[in-house]
Image (tube, helix red, strand yellow):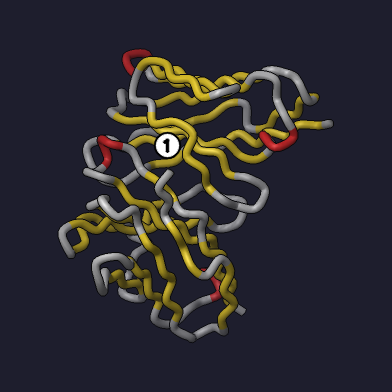
Amino acid sequence: EPEVTQTPSHQVTQMGQEVILRCVPISNHLYFYWYRQILGQKVEFLVSFYNNEISEKSEIFDDQFSVERPDGSNFTLKIRSTKLEDSAMYFCASSVQGANYGYTFGSGTRLTVV
Amino acid sequence: GIQVEQSPPDLILQEGANSTLRCNFSDSVNNLQWFHQNPWGQLINLFYIPSGTKQNGRLSATTVATERYSLLYISSSQTTDSGVYFCAHNFGNEKLTFGTGTRLTIIP
């Protein structure tokens, strides 16, 4: 069964450093998403991406965050200057034609900011 | 926005038992998914079930959208079923809203 692949599985970074989280969505999917889950809390929507642009973003997704699809297969989330409160599990997801067709989530990247 | 409440918040069962997890919505929803988050934090898709009933092995799910609830059934529980179960929906946009989760612990 096709999978959404995320790398790395765990990343530790110092406060103030830039991090890039990487995702390879399912190849025929057109919609891409990032979610995050702070330890012990709900999974929260960050951003959706379609046709090479952001289609929707939450209030969490401020100027410190950016997304990019640099080539035909990768989808990245960049955090410019990490803060302690950015420590969380970050999930990438993709969908073949958007919300009405369900989402497939990756295994997540656990980001620890020290 | 639409509220998503799950019950019970915690459930501890002996291996082999059956369980029913519930997801209630404050308004009608278009789409509904169930996920299992395992003890390693991985989020695993279980069902995309906007309406009706689906079965996959020991798991099945039913959504009654007009009555604003969905149920996840787990039969003959195994220790590997432990983790947190989330329902999630979207309504008219691309944003998936997750419920508060049910933490299931299966004791050998």
Q: Position of residue A3 (x, y in %)?
A: 43, 51
Under tag 1, what secondary structure? Answer: strand
Query: Does the image show residue A13?
Result: yes
B12 relative to B71, above or below: below
Give whichever of A98, A80 is nearer the camera.
A98
Which quadrant holds residue A91? bottom left
**In screen coordinates, is A49 left or right of B37?**
left
User: Would you say A55 lies left or right of A60 here?
Assistant: left
Instruction: Using the image, determine if residue A35 lies above or below residue A23.
Output: above
Residue occupying image coordinates x 28% and y 58%: A57
x and y, in percent, of residue A72 in the image: 24, 66
User: What chain does mark 1 sit on?
Assistant: B
Q: What residue sits right under mark 1 in the picture?
A: B88
Residue A60: give x, y in percent of width and height: 38, 62
Furthest residue in direction left, as rendered:
A51
Question: From the viewer's perspective, is residue B40 above or below residue A100?
Answer: below
Check the image and name the residue furthest to the right: B108
Of residues A5 and A55, the one drawn nearer to the viewer in this rendering: A5
Number of numbered discs:
1
Question: What amino acid is labelled 1 in the image?
Answer: Ala
Residue A28 horizontal side relative to residue B38, left or right: left
Q: Which quarter of the rendering shows the N terminus of chain A?
A: top left
Which picture quadrant has residue B21? top right
Q: Closest to the observer: A46 or A69?
A: A69
